Amino acid sequence: MLAAVAGPARARPPAAAPDAGNFWREVIEPHADEVQVLLRNARHTMREPDNALMTDSDWAVEQRQKFFVDAYNLLRYARKLSPNNVEVLAMFARAADELGKTREAIEALETCIRVTGPDKAGAEVTGRLGAIYLRLGERDTAIRWLRYAQGPLTSDSAPATVHLANALAARGEVGKALDTLHNALPPTAFGYQPDAALVAFALAVLYDRDEQLAAAFEILDRMQASLQQGYAMVLHNELAKLRYAPAEDEHYYLALFYESLGHYVEARAQWALYAASGESPWRARALAHIAAIDHQRRTSPTVKPPTQIKPPPTP
C-alpha cells in the first residue's frame, strides 16, 4: 500500500566502477605504462650523443652509434607492444636512420603517416622522410614530403626547410628556393633564435650560389650584428646538427661559415674539399672563392691565423 502511494520507484543507474577508466585504457593500450618507460629511456639515451654535438668532444663513430643501438633495441620492443604508437614510430625511425637502417626508417615513418595522415604527422616525421629520400637521390619524392614539414620554425621544421630549398635549387628552381627560405623566416629576426639562424644562413648560402654576393653578405653582416659574440657558437651548433643532403654540401656550408668569420685558411680547405667532391652544381662557385682567397693572401701582408673553433662533427 505504501509503495502504491509513493508511486513507482525510479531506477537508479549503477554507480561507475572506480577503475572503469583504467579498465578501458588497459583494453585499448594494455602496455601503455611499459611503453612510456621505454620511450623515456630511449629519449634519454639519444640525448647523450645529441648533447655531445654541442661540445668540442671528438666522439668516435662507434661511441656515438652505441647509444643509438641501445635506443633502437628499446624502441623495437616498444613497437612490438604498441605497433601504431606514433611517438614510438617516429623515435624508432630516427634511431634506425642514425644506424643506417634506411629501409626500416622509411617503413616506420610511412606507417606513422598512414596512422595520422600526412597533414597531421608533423615535421619530425615528414621532414625526416623527405631528408632520407633526398639522401637517396629521389629528389621529387623528397620535395613532396618536405613540403608537408613547412610551418612555424622549430628544431624539426628548420632543417626540413633548408633541405627543401636546397632540393628546389638543385632542380633549377632557385626563385622558389629563395622564396621558401624568405617565407620561413619570421618578420623580424631580431636576436636570431637558433632555428631562424640556420634558415638565414642557408639563405646566404643560396644567394652565394646564385652569385648574388651582395645579398649573401648583407644577410651575414646582419646576423653578426644581431648575434655579436654568439654568432660563431650559434651557427657552429646548428651546422653540427644538420645532416647534409648531398653530403658534400657540408663543405660548402662550413666554407662560407669560416669565410664569414675571416678564417680563410679553414675556408679555403673546405672550398677545396667541395670542389674535389665531383661534378657538384656549384663547383665553379667554390673555385671562385678559392681564387679570391688566394688573391687576398698574395696582396695582403698578413693572413689571419686558423681559428680555434673546430669544424662541427658529422652527425
Image: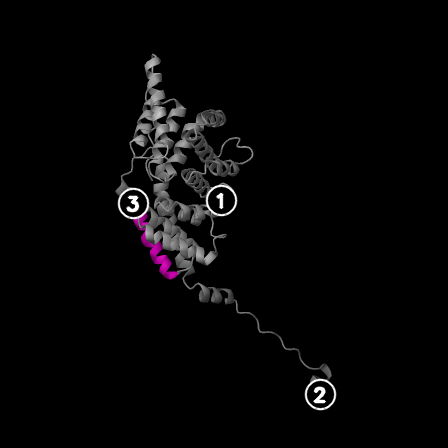
* Residue at mark 2: 1
Q: Could you say where residue 304 lies in the image, as x and y percent from the top left?
A: 35, 18
**Stretch of the chain drawn in magenta:** 66-81
Secondary element under disc 3, as helix, strand or loop, is helix
Disc 1 or 2, which lies upstream in sequence? 2
Q: Give the residue drawn at x 66%, y 78%.
A: 10
Residue 202 in magenta?
Answer: no
The front one of 143 and 148 is 143
Q: Nearer the viewer, mark 1 or mark 2?
A: 1
User: Type of residue at label 1?
Assistant: Gln
Secondary element under disc 2, as helix, strand or loop, is loop
Q: CA distance from mark 3 to mark 2?
A: 83 Å
Q: Give the residue drawn at x 33%, y 19%.
A: 294
Position of the N terminus by quadrant = bottom right
User: Type of residue at label 3?
Assistant: Gln
* Residue at mark 3: 65
Asked if one can make out residue 75 in the rendered structure from this viewpoint, the answer is yes
Disc 1 or 3, which lies upstream in sequence? 3
The front one of 239 and 308 is 239
* Residue at mark 1: 150
